[in-house]
Image (cartoon, rainbow, N blue to C red):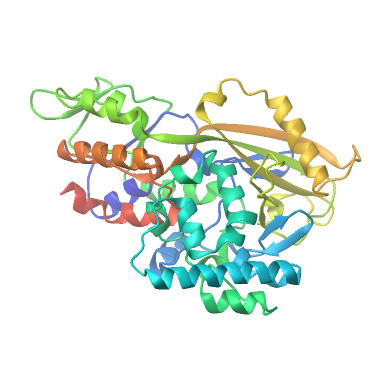
Amino acid sequence: MSAAYHLLRKGVKDVVCIDGDTAPGGLMKTVELNGFIFDIGGSHIIFSSNESILEEILSFLGSNVIKHYRETSVQLHDIFAPYPLENGLYVLPPSLRAEILTSFIESLLELAKDPLRKPRNLEEYFRCYFGRELTEIYLKPYNEKIWKKSLNEIDVDWLSIPGRLPVPSWKDVVKSAIGIPTVGYKEQAIFYYPLRGGIQTLYNSVLNRALDLGLTLITGIEVRSIKRDAYGKWIVNDKIEAKKIVSTIPLKELVHIINIPDISHELTRYSKFLDFNSLIVIGIALRKKAPDMHWVYVPDKNIIFHRYAWISNYSPYNTPNQNELSSLIVEITLRPEEFKSIRMERIIDKVIQDLKNLNLVSESEREMLFTKAWVHTYGYPIHTHQSNNARTQILNSLSNIDVVSLGRWGTWRYLNMDKIFEESKYLKNLLS
C-alpha cells in the first residue's frame, strides 16, 4: 500500500492494487471486540531512526496520534528488568550483575585480539558482543523460543537492518552493572501509536491517501497466475493487464504463481529453502487495571509465549474503561509443520495458566472477561544461511524479468514497517 501511494504521488498512472483478502491490512489489522481494541498481527508501534521517514509516517495520522516513553521489560522470573537488558542490569542481584559484566568484558577483550572477526551465526554474535552470561540467561533462550531453531543455524545479516538488534555501548553496560540507569535502543525509547482505531488506522490512512490520488483497489481476489503475453505485457489471473509488477506476496508462494519459461523450475527449487515461522496472537480482556507497562519479553522456555503486550496502555481508547479494565495480547511462534494440527483450545488454556504462573492474572474467574485467537501462516521470516542464499537467487531472477518484490515477505527479510515504507518511497527508480 505504501508502494502504491509513493508511485501515485510521483506521477505514475493507473496503479492497481490487488488484495486477496476482502478486508485488507495484513498483519496490521485491528479488530474491536466489546469495546476492546486488539492489533491482531501482534504488537505494532511507530518509530524509526530515520527522522524524515518517521515524520512522513506520522503525517498520515495528523492529530490522531499518541506519544509514549517506552515502558518495556525483560521478565526474568519475578524480576522485570528494563529493556534492553544490558541497560537494565541495575535491577538484578549484585552477584548476577558481576557475572554479566565480567563475561561482557571478557568478550570485548577477545574481540580486541581479532577486531576483524565476523560472527558466523546468531549465537556467535551474541557471545561476541554481549558476553557469555547475558547470552545464556536471556538472548539465547529468548531467540530459540521465537525462531524455534538452534542459533547456530541463524544468519546474522538481518542484524544490520536499521531498527534491529544494536550492539551495546560498553560504557552503558558498565554504568548499568554498577547501578546507574541508562537508555538503550534510543530510537525506540520514544514511540508513537494511533490515538483511536489501533494500528490499522495507519494502514487505512495510507490507503485513503492513495485512493485520493487515483488508486484502483481490488479486494477479495487471490492472485493465482502471473504471466507474459506475446507482446511483453503482464497478465494477472488471465484478465488484468499490467506493464509493471510490484509484489508483496510471500516469495515462497510467488514463485509458484509466476509462469515464465526457463526460470519457473529454478525459482521453485530455491523456494524450498525459504524458512519461516507461523504466528498465533491471542487477545485477552480483563477486569483489572493494567500495570504501567507496554510490552514484555519472556525468555522462560516453560512459558508458551515469547512476548506479551498491554495493548490497553497503547491508547486510552483501546479499552472501554482504562481505570477498571485492561487488555493484553500474547505472541506465540510455531513451525509451519505444526500449523495444521494446532489445538487452539489447548493453547489458550496454556496461555491462561502461564499468565497465572507469571502473576499477570489471578485465579478469579471474574477477572477474565474473554479471549480471542488469531492465526497467521506467515509470522516471521527466518534468516538461515540456506534461506538467505535462496532469497538472493530468487530476487535476482525476479529482477531479471522486471518483477519488483517488496516488503517483509516479498524480500524475505525481517523488516519493520518504517524500513518498508522507506524502501517503497524509492520504488520508482526501480520501475523506470
At 25% from the left edge and 55% from the top edge, which residue is drawn?
Answer: 10
Q: Is residue 223 above or below residue 300?
A: above
Q: Residue at x 25, y 21 (%)?
A: 239
The x and y percentages for residue 417 are 45, 52
Residue 78, position in %: x, y?
79, 56
- Side of 33 relative to 135 (left or right): right
Using the image as rendered, state which of residue 240 and residue 180 is in the foreground: 180
**Which residue appears farthest toward the left when viewing the image?**
231
Q: Quadrant of residue 131?
A: bottom right
Q: Of 336 and 23, which appears nearest the observer?
A: 336
Eyeballing the image, is 303 above or below 166?
Answer: above
Quadrant in which the N terminus is drawn:
top left
Relative horizontal placement of residue 168, taking residue 99 as reference (left or right): left
What is the number of callouts on the image? 0
Instruction: Report whether residue 198 is seen.
Output: no
| Res 178 seen here | yes
Which image quadrant is residue 282 in?
A: top right
Q: Quadrant of residue 84?
A: bottom right
Q: Nearer the viewer, residue 426 or 117?
A: 117
Identify which residue is drawn at 48% across, 38% down: 26
Taking the image as shown, residue 298 lies to the left or right of residue 261, namely right
Q: x, y (%) of residue 33?
A: 70, 38
Residue 383 percent coordinates (x, y): 41, 44
